[in-house]
Amino acid sequence: MHIGDSFKKIIVVKDRIKLWRNEEGIVVMGIMDFLLNPNSLEL
């Protein structure tokens, strides 16, 4: 949160969850979605 760059911030968790964004724009996704979806960094 305190890094003042324009890079996308992604949190990858080990559980199977539906992808969502928090109010700061940080993307939270499950590890399987991250690893198996070739476009996971574009979401």
Image (cartoon, rainbow, N blue to C red):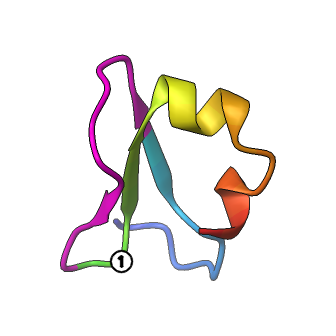
Name the residue rendered at 81%, 46% in the picture: 38
Q: Is residue 20 above or below residue 10?
A: below
Name which residue lies at 61% across and 78% down: 5
Image quadrant where residue 11 sits: top left
The quadrant of the image that shows the N terminus is bottom left
Q: Residue furthest right?
A: 38
Residue 24 image offset from top left, x and y in percent: 27, 78
Magenta-drawn segment: 12-23
- Residue at 49% across, 67% down: 3
In the displayed structure image, the side of residue 12 where residue 23 appears, left or right: left
Residue 13 to residue 38: above or below:
above
> Is residue 37 in the magenta section?
no
Q: Residue shown at 36%/54% (left/top)? A: 19
Where is residue 41? Give x, y as percent: 70, 58
Task: Using the image, determine if residue 40 lies above or below residue 1.
Answer: above
Q: Is residue 33 left or right of residue 38?
A: left
Q: Position of residue 32 (x, y in %)?
A: 53, 25
- Residue indicated by mark 1: 25
Secondary-structure class at tag 1:
loop
Taking the magenta stretch, the answer to whether it contains residue 20 is: yes
